[in-house]
Amino acid sequence: MKTSILTVTQLTAQIKDLLEDTFPEVWISGEISNLSIPQSGHAYFTLKDEQSQIRAVLFRQSQRFLKFTLQHGMQVICRGRVGVYEPRGEYQMALDYIEPLGVGALQKAFEELKTRLDREGLFASEHKKQLPMLPRRIGIITSPTGAAIHDILRVIKRRHPRMHILLYPIPVQGPEAAPSLVEAVRYFNYEKNVDVIILGRGGGSLEDLWAFNEESVARAIHASRIPIISAVGHETDYTITDFVSDLRAPTPSAAAEMVVESEDAFYKHLGMLKTDLVEAMRRILTQFRVLLSENLLQLKDPRKKLEQQIQRIDELGKRLITGFSYHLRRDRALLQSLTTALDHLNPLHILARGYSITTVFPSETILRNASQVAAGDLLITKVHTGEILSRVEDQRKPFD
């Protein structure tokens, strides 16, 4: 009997076919280790228990259904097929579903998203907007055929029959629910045609309510400039929208009661505000009357002040005239004294007593010494009543 000799590739291919035909779908549990996610987006890791391990891969296209983050050391339940990675001759699990062991994948995803958004501050109280006391229009985002819209409309009609309501119809579960929720919130914010929004639906399982746990919906609510009330499910149901919205209502009916007071209660509230306002105005007027009376007592008659100032001006005027007369008399006496002294110094008075002044012609230099002239020079002699022109015949030194 002739022995058949196989190449490594042939043997590996036969083993691959055998494994894939024998294990087309397998459920397996284990712990994730050696987790690696390269740029391709595929997740490679090892599933192990206390005695054994097997390689596993979760391709990127299968991860779109993944509701939580894969982590090293996580205990998981997986579904997939057994195959062989032929280049290395290693068998592995090619997975198409995975969920955490002991807790559902949706619950795990809910807790992870809730924790992450809380850390980012999307649930912080400082971001919560106040509801209007009486909205002009209410926007409702829900299914047009569900019980939630009927409950909301019934309560609003009973409490405020003339309230304007705008309904944005959406599917509240399924793959189109979350994108429709985001589009509805953005629509009302773009149009600015409502004062408050109710986001609601009836109760259901975690999977039924999952559209209200999507991150895209949470971020659209956080970005809304219009206050939003989350009214999803029953009182015991909690979704991500409950935490990020401005107010959570336990039921859709409760949301309608929160957003609209009854007309009677509203007008009663207005009456109370009117009474409080009147009383406050009375107190303020009384305080101003008392303050005005106190100020009037301290306020002096302005005519008395004016009369005092007029009297003061008259007094200062009299003092000014007295002082001016004194200085005028003093200055006149001083002027007379100076005039007399100046008159005594007038050279014409000296000439009247027989003296004269001689100057050299034509320079009019006063002649003080005989040596200033020579024979033939012209002289002008000023006497009291005129001038005498003369010519020098000779000069003599003093005491010649």
Image: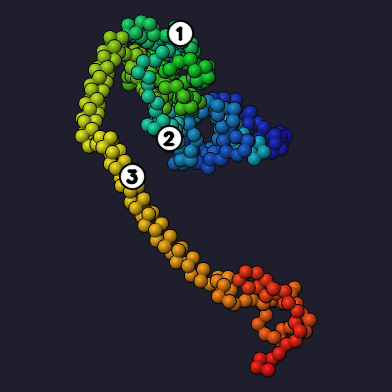
The single residue placed furthest to the right in the displayed view is: 376
Between the residue at mark 2 and the residue at mark 1, the CA separation in whole angstroms equals: 33 Å
Say above or below: 188 vs 399.
above
User: Dot 1 corresponds to which residue?
Assistant: 144
Q: Quadrant of residue 111?
A: top left
Q: Residue at x 33, y 19 (%)?
A: 250
Label 3 CA crowd tier, 10 Å (few <14, some 14–19, many 20+): few
Amino acid type at image mark 3: Ile
Q: How many marks?
A: 3
Amino acid type at image mark 1: Pro
Q: Tell me the SS state at disc 2.
A: loop
Find residue 58 and report its horizontal and vertical position in percent: 56, 32
Q: Residue at x 65, y 73 (%)?
A: 382
Q: Tell me the SS state at disc 1.
A: loop
**Among numbered discs 2 and 1, the one appearing first in the sequence:** 2
Q: Is residue 32 in view from this perspective?
A: yes
User: Dot 2 corresponds to which residue?
Assistant: 121
Label 2 CA crowd tier, 10 Å (few <14, some 14–19, many 20+): few
Q: Is residue 344 left or right of residue 319?
A: right
Label 1 CA crowd tier, 10 Å (few <14, some 14–19, many 20+): some
Q: Quadrant of residue 288?
A: top left
Amino acid type at image mark 2: Gly
User: Dot 3 corresponds to which residue?
Assistant: 313
Q: Residue at x 67, y 77 (%)?
A: 358
